[in-house]
Image: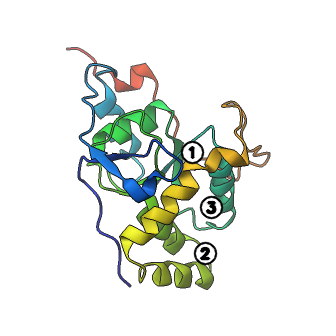
Amino acid sequence: IWNPQRRQDSTTEQFPLSLSAFTTATSSPTDNTDVFSDDWKDVALKAFENDKRPIILFDGICNLCSGSVNFALDHDPNETFRFASLQSKTGESLLIQAGRHHKDTSSIIVVTSSDGSHYDRSDAVLYISQGLEGLGFRILANTGYLVPRSIRNVIYQIISENRFRFGSIAPDQCRIDFDGEFDGRFVEDPSQSSLCTPSD
């Protein structure tokens, strides 16, 4: 089984138009240090301190994205993945660690380690598919890898850019977990005190 190469480059693609995947423009990521709190690295490291499972970063105000998270939860009984909103402090910190702008919501991201190693766009979708329960998902993923990445990413980007056609949701809406089945699946933002090192 061939896995996509983990992306550690610092290039973020911008897609200003709904079909701009056909005319992709690349640019260097914006320096985050002057617009984001200086504890982002501690937050990123904290996310993997006691739990090494990959973290799926998703757009928390997108109905299609949230539906995809619910789908992944229902088909991941082995609890392979954790989740965090791209708009959360943890999500933004992991984006910086991955070499991206902290406000970049152009793609789903799967961060696989505290050093920022990650998959994005169609590679992320196929990586997630391989981790879900069921032979069909693995067949889908392995078949998808046969399609050139450039073509896969064009298809992904068209869907991504039009995702709000499926409707948006309020940031405070979420799946109700009555029995605690999904405890530990969503990465919470650390408290400020947990990021501080006691002085001597």
Q: Which mark is residue 186?
A: 1
Q: Earlier in the sequence, mark 2 or mark 1?
A: 2
Camera-side residue of 160 and 15: 15
Instruction: Give coordinates of residue 184: x percent, y percent.
Output: 57, 47
Residue of label 3? 72
Q: Quadrant of the N terminus?
A: bottom left
Q: Mark 1 and 3 residues: CB-CB less than 8 Å, in contact?
A: no
Q: Is residue 28 visible?
A: yes
Q: Secondary structure at mark 1?
A: loop
Query: How far is the residue under mark 3 from the one under mark 2?
Result: 9 Å
Camera-side residue of 44 and 144: 144
Instruction: Give coordinates of residue 129: x percent, y percent.
Output: 53, 71
Residue, far top? 200
Residue of label 2? 133
43 w.r.t. 37: above or below: below
Tell me which residue sits at (19%, 14%) in the image. Answer: 200
Query: How many residues crowd mark 2 within 10 Å: few (<14), some (14–19), many (20+)?
Result: some
Q: Which mark is residue 196?
A: none
Tell me which residue sits at (54%, 85%) in the image. Answer: 139
For badge 1, the amino acid type reads Phe
Report the mark closest to the observer, 1 or 3: 3
Tell me which residue sits at (27%, 32%) in the image. Answer: 30
Tell me which residue sits at (48%, 70%) in the image. Answer: 126
Q: Earlier in the sequence, mark 1 or mark 3?
A: 3
Query: How many residues crowd mark 3 within 10 Å: few (<14), some (14–19), many (20+)?
Result: many
